[in-house]
Structures are given as structure tokens and as C-alpha cells.
Image: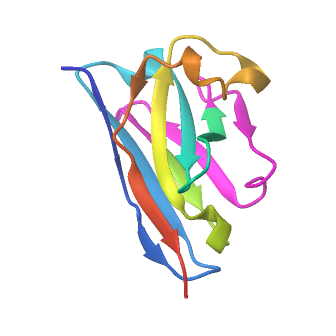
Amino acid sequence: QLQLVESGGGLVQPGGSLRLSCAASGFTLDRYNIGWFRQAPGKEREGVSCISRSGGSIVYADSVKGRFIISRDNVKNTVYLQMNSLKPEDTAVYYCAATRSWAGSRCYETALYEYWGQGTQVTVSS
């Protein structure tokens, strides 16, 4: 069974950090481009960051640029999202997704993605 599984979410104070992981099972992640998305209550799902298969191309949403870092370890079949200087507005369920299509700045188009994880909750609150 082909699956993506996110982990690493939790409750953190403003200014804190978390590292999310997106692990693949049943398929080789190095053939896929990965996107991180988030969805807050009452809001639409939005793209956070994308990384190409090799890791050579990366895109960040303006809202997280300079604070979040996406990376991948194809040996471990895992993609990471390091989130620093977290703000209350970063509170959301975070999802990773996989696609064989790299669309550059359009990588936030959800229709591109073939596989989705179940999500992990991130709550930023004092």
C-alpha cells in the first residue's frame, strides 16, 4: 500500500520550533516532488513549500520564507519541514503530498498531487 505519513506536530509556544517529517512507504520517494500544505480551521488548504525530486529546486510561500526550511533525505525516504520562529497564525493541520510533476512556482496546485498524507496538527499558542 502506497502511503505518506506525517509526524512531528504538536503544541509549541510562539517563537518556538518544530520539525515535521513526511515518510513514504510502499514507494520510492526520490521519484517524486513533494509539497507541504496546511489547512487552518475555516480556511482553504494553502501551499507552504515544495521541493523537487533531487532537492535542487525549492519554493516557499511568502508567509513562511525565512522561517521554514524544506529538505529531503532520499536514502531515508523522508522529507522534512523545519519550522522556526513559529507564530500563532501558523496553527493548522500540515499535510505532505507527492507528485511526479514539477511545476515550479505552480507547485501549490493540489490537483498535481497523487498521494497525500493524513496530516499532523501544529498548534502555536502560549
Identity of the residue furthest to the bottom in this view: 126
59 in magenta: yes
- Can residue 86 be spotted in the picture? no
The residue most toward the left is: 1
Q: Position of residue 53 (x, y in %)?
A: 55, 21
Q: Position of residue 43 (x, y in %)?
A: 61, 49
Location of residue 23 with respect to 113 vertically, above or below: below
Asked if one can make out residue 83 in the rendered structure from this viewpoint, the answer is: yes
User: Which residues are drawn in magenta?
Assistant: 51-79
**Is residue 71 or residue 12 the one in the foreground?**
12
Q: Quadrant of the C terminus?
A: bottom right
> Given the current orientation, which residue lies at the most extreme right position?
62
Residue situated in front as seen by the camera: 6 or 111: 111
Q: Quadrant of residue 82?
A: bottom right
What percent of the width, then of the height, locates residue 85?
Answer: 67, 72
Q: Residue at x 29, y 18 (%)?
A: 27
Identified at 68% across, 27% down, the residue is 56
Examine the structure image and report whether residue 48 is included in the region drawn in magenta. Answer: no
Looking at the image, is 101 positioned above or below residue 54? above
Q: Is residue 86 above or below residue 19?
A: below
Residue 108: percent from left, percent from top: 66, 29
The N terminus appears in which quarter of the rendering?
A: top left
Q: Up-down: is 12 above or below 90?
A: below
Quarter assignment of residue 121: bottom left
- Residue drawn at point x = 56 percent, y = 41 percent: 37
> On the rendered structure, is 117 left or right of 112?
left
Residue at figure coordinates x 42%, y 30% from the top left: 74
